Amino acid sequence: ALPAAGAGRYVLISTVSVYAPTKDLPVSESAPLLAGPLPLPGPAADYGFNKRLAEHAAAAQGLLRQIPATILRPAVIYGRYNYAPREPYFFDLVERGEPVVIPKDDLALFQLVYVKDVARAVLAAAESPKAEGEAYNLAAPELLSYGRLVEVLEAATGRRIETVALPAARIDAARIPLPFPLTEHWIHSGEKIVRDLGFSYTKLVPAMRQTYEDYRKNRQE
């Protein structure tokens, strides 16, 4: 549907879920991509592979129509107006004064990226000639476990948060909707965009504090 001429840049919002499973961490932009859907239940099976196909289509269109494309692969996005039950899930528990369930073996590490950082990355990708034909992970360097996430939430909300530690298998069996990996690391390098475009990531605690303030304002509205 794109015009043959007149489009200066195409910026595709992809995801770090396009990468094939690996233990070689952190995962960089040069890592192998998925060759097919994952053996998972529900939409998660196809999500990353469909994004991979979207990347392929965007690259092909760029070559055919001479429209330079940049691909952005965010990790887990958080921030204002988040429609996904990630940090709002924890904020809801905090507001109700309920404990937060965390894995008993608090070893799995993951990363987030602030929604305003994603917006700034889109602008940088659209404006910088260096970004033409490139793919960039968007993953802040701060590594989180569920235990560390609770500490961040306490700092952001100013509340003391009670936790209940359960084995991962029990969390799964009880269908407790924890939004991040329970037993495996999910770590990606977000440094390429820093090197190429002079990008910087917002610190986690102040960004999460602003996210909590926005969450409370939205509830009042």
Image (tube, helix red, strand yellow):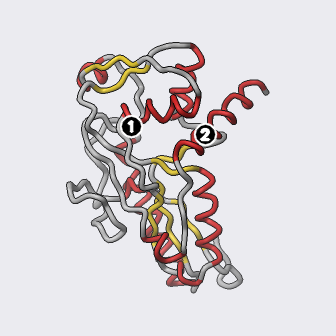
Rendered image: mark on residue 53: none
User: Vertically, is 136 above or below 213?
Assistant: below
Q: Crowdedness of circle 1 by 10 Å Cα count: few (<14), some, many (20+)?
A: some
Residue 179 vs 129, above or below: the answer is above
Q: What residue did someone put label 1 on? A: 180
Question: In the orientation shown, which residue stands out farthest toward the right?
Answer: 221
- The residue closer to the viewer here, 221 or 196, is 196
Q: Position of residue 167 (x, y in %)?
A: 24, 22
Residue at 53% of width from left, 33% of height from top? 155
Spot occupied by residue 41 in the image (x, y as percentages of width and height):
32, 36
In the picture of the structure, the residue carrying the numbered disc 2 is 82
Secondary structure type for disc 1: loop
Vertical relation: 182 (above or below) 139: above
- For the point 46% across and 55% down, the residue is 140
Left or right of 48: which side holds 85? right
Label 2: which secondary element: loop
| Res 10 quadrant in image | bottom right
Give the residue type that dot 2 points to. Asn
Q: Position of residue 94 (x, y in %)?
A: 55, 20
Density class for disc 2 (Cα within 10 Å; few <14, some 14-19, many ≥20) is: some
Q: State left or right for residue 10 relative to residue 141.
A: right
Residue 195, horizontal then vertical, whole percent: 46, 75
Q: Quadrant of the N terminus?
A: bottom right
User: Which of marks 1 and 2 precedes in the sequence?
Assistant: 2
Q: Amino acid at mark 1?
A: Phe
